[in-house]
Image: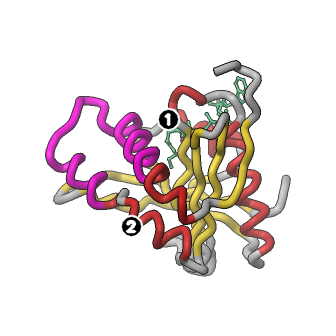
Amino acid sequence: MPAADPVTIRYAEPADAANLAALAIQIWLQTYAKDGIRDTLSDYVLSHYTPERMAEYISDPDRRLLVAERAAHLVGYSQLHLAAACPSDTTARAEMETLYVQAHFHGGGIGAALLEAALAQCQEAGHGRLWLTVFHGNERAIRFYHNHGFREIGTDDFIVGDERHKNLVLIRRAAAF
Ligand SMILES: CC(C)(COP(=O)(O)OP(=O)(O)OC[C@H]1O[C@@H](n2cnc3c(N)ncnc32)[C@H](O)[C@@H]1OP(=O)(O)O)[C@@H](O)C(=O)NCCC(=O)NCCS
C-alpha cells in the first residue's frame, strides 16, 4: 500500500463487528502476550473480543466506538463508555475503555487522532473529564497518555482469569488544554 493512503476516523458500524474483534485480539496479544500464548490469555481474548460482543458495544447507547480506516482496512479503534464510574473518583463517569492502534501504524498520529475525536465525543455528551486505566508496565501507552495531559489518580486491579495485574488510573479534562 502506498504510504500516502489517508487515514479516516469514522463511527463504527454493525458491519465492522468481526473486523473489530480480530483487530482487538491482534493488538491485545501484541501488547500483553510478550512471552507467547498460554491458556489464560487465549481464554481472555477469545471470550472478550467476539463479533457478538463488539456488535453489542457498537449498538450500546452508552458507548461510542470510532474506527481508524486506511485503504479500506481497519488499523485502530477507540471505545468510550459514558456511564462508567471511575474507581478513584466516582464523579468522573466517562471512560476510554479502549484505544488501540495496530503496531504497524504506531507513531503515525492515529492514536492522537482517535483520542482527540473521543475527547470531542466526551464533551458533546456533557462530560468534563475522561478517565482510563492502563497496565502499569505499558510504558509506551503511559508516556502517550502523559503527553496528552492525563495524570495518575490511583491504581486498580485488572483481572485476567485468576490473575490480578496492577493498572494505573489516569484522568484529564475533556476540554482542550
Ligand atoms: C498507545 C497507542 C494507542 C498510541 O497510538 P499511536 O498511533 O502510536 O500514537 P501517536 O502516533 O499519536 O503517538 C505516539 C508517539 O508517536 C509520536 N508521533 C506522533 N505522530 C508521529 C509521526 N507522524 N511520526 C513519528 N512519530 C509520531 C508521538 O510523539 C508519540 O510519542 P510518545 O510515544 O513519546 O507518546 C498505541 O501505541 C497502541 O495502540 N498501543 C497498543 C495498545 C495499547 O497499549 N493501548 C493503550 C492501552 S490503555
Main SS of the magenta part reads: helix
Please give the range of residues in magenta: 21-47
* Relative to 4, residue 147 above or below: below
Ligand 1 lies in which image quarter? top right
Q: Secondary structure at mark 1?
A: helix
Q: Secondary structure at mark 2?
A: helix
Q: Locate residue 116 relative to residue 36 in the image: left or right.
A: right
Q: Residue at x 76, y 63 (%)?
A: 174
**Magenta stretch containing residue 28, yes or no?**
yes
Label 1 and label 2: CA atoms lie apart by 31 Å
Screen quadrant of the N terminus:
top right
Quadrant hosting residue 64: bottom right
- Viewer-closest of 66 and 69: 69
Q: Residue at x 41, y 47 (%)?
A: 22
**Res. 51 mark:** none
Per the image, the residue denoted by label 2 is 52
Q: Locate residue 52 relative to residue 132 in the image: left or right.
A: left
**Magenta stretch containing residue 110, yes or no?**
no
Q: Locate residue 115 relative to residue 133 in the image: left or right.
A: right
Q: Residue at x 59, y 30 (%)?
A: 106
Per the image, the residue denoted by label 1 is 139
Q: Position of residue 155 (x, y in %)?
A: 44, 59
Q: Residue furthest right?
A: 177
Q: Amino acid at mark 2?
A: Glu
Q: Residues within 10 Å of mark 2 (few under 14, many from 20)?
A: some
Q: Are marks 1 and 2 in contact (CB under 8 Å)?
A: no
Q: Earlier in the sequence, mark 1 or mark 2?
A: 2
Labels 1, 2: front one: 2
- Viewer-closest of 62 and 169: 62
Q: Position of residue 7 (x, y in %)?
A: 72, 38
